[in-house]
Image (cartoon, grey):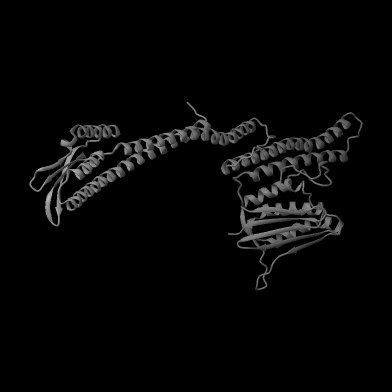
Amino acid sequence: MRYSLKQRLTVSYIIIVIASIGFAILFANVGIKNQFKRYAIQKQEKETAEIVNLIQLKYEEEGGFSSHYLDLIGMNALQNGMTVVIKDSGNKTVWSAYEHNNGLCQAMIQNMTINMSSYSNKWDGKYEERTYALKLKNSEIGVLTTGFMGPYYFNDEELIFIKALNSILLFTGAASLLLAFALGIIMSARLSSPLIKISEKALALAKGEYRGRITEEVNTREIKILADTMNQLSEALSDKDRLRKQLTQDVAHELRTPLTSVQGHMEAMLDGVWELSTERLESCYEEILRIKKLIGSIEDLSVIEDKNIILHLEEFEFQKLAGRMIHNYENDIVEKNMTIRLNVPMSSEGVKDDMLYADKDKICQVLNNLLSNAVKYSDKGAEINITFGKEEKQAIIRVTDTGMGISEVDLPHIFERFYRADKSRNRNTGGAGIGLAITEAIIKAHGGSITVNSKYGEGTEFTITLPQG
């Protein structure tokens, strides 16, 4: 049988309180019993010593034993649970509690036995007698014999106190139990309520419902982290779902445009509307190449994102590689009157320090994508800077331009597949939107990272970090 969190927490609180109160009552009773035992024994010894001193003092004052003060001393001792028998130096009984009031003595002994038996069924006390010498100026004047229930006993007032204390402990335990039950319900409700919301949200995510968020205020740190994580997961899945739908639309759009163009050309030539010519066939062929290039880009991205991608790592000169890539865009650079600079650091000996350990072909593809974007999205007279440097066993590559920049809305999504800031997907302003996704995948395959910093209307800077040894 499965129990809810609320039931488990409530039962846990109750068990803890029962155990705590139970141990408290047990330790309190054991402690009180031991303390009262010591107290009863010490009290009895003290009272006996006081009786001995008082009899000796009165004997000296009166010049002998007198029934007047012996009656007072003996009856007072009897009321405190102690029988007294006094004999003179000739062993003659001067005063005896049994002779004075035997019935009261027997009743007292019986009452103490009943009281102690009611206090503890393990009490094994019995009537005991002790003898003390009575002296005056180092001369023995008689003998005092005391009788009591040993080894200890509690009088009526002491038993009332002990029973009252136990009653208070039991009442406290019962009240604590009720309080624990109430607190258990309240605390378990406060804990289980957000967890129920989180579980409901998890079920909703499993069904593909990503819109809702957990907005309930949570005071428990761990549950708050769990709720925030669930909200982040919902947001991420929502974005992924949006990208999936957008991906389907984009791929369909990218394939439909050239296919529609080829279809139109072919139908026109087959119907005799257009004359079959080399020029029109070349146009169809170009559209087919565009489709092939798109499919190839998608395949490249799939291969690069595969965790088992094989990198052919080697050491090469970054300046030569970057210089060759710059030459590929020479016509565009001249046409737009752009300036492009390649900055490579020099060592302390005046030697270039541009050796890079990576997959040369993959880094070439990365630079090609970044330069292509920089040239494409820059106006006439813009500047492009490629900087290479090393910091703490890391190679840092920066590609900076003074082009149109990227808006704050588009900036978080530029590395996503098929994402393009130009929602019209005009080919004059961009390709299929896969280049930066491939770039990021290549850098991550090297164990590095790529970040972007851009301000719309001012320019963009891509920073690549690659581990070196």
Using the image as rendered, state which of residue 234 and residue 179 is in the foreground: 179
State the residue at coordinates (87%, 40%).
Answer: 278
Question: Which residue occupies the foreground of this view, 264 or 235?
Answer: 235
Q: Is residue 410 left or right of residue 167?
A: right
Q: Which of the two residues, 23 or 144, is positioned nearer the viewer here?
A: 144
Task: Write the residue at 35% across / 35% down.
Answer: 163
Q: Decide: is 238 above or below 397.
A: above
Rendered location of residue 416, percent (x, y)? 71, 44
Q: How many marks?
A: 0
Residue 12 appears in the rendering: no
- Asked where in the image residue 257 lies, by quadrant, the reply is top right
Is residue 127 visible to us here?
Answer: yes
In the image as oriented, which residue stretches furthest toward the left? 90
* Residue lying at 56% horizontally and 36% vertically, measured from the top left: 191
Direction from residue 69 to residue 280 in the image, left or right? right
Q: Is residue 124 left or right of residue 244?
A: left
- Residue 451 rendering spot, x and y as whole percentages: 70, 53
Pick the residue in front: 446 or 101: 101
Residue 403 placement: quadrant: bottom right
The quadrant in which the C terminus is found is bottom right
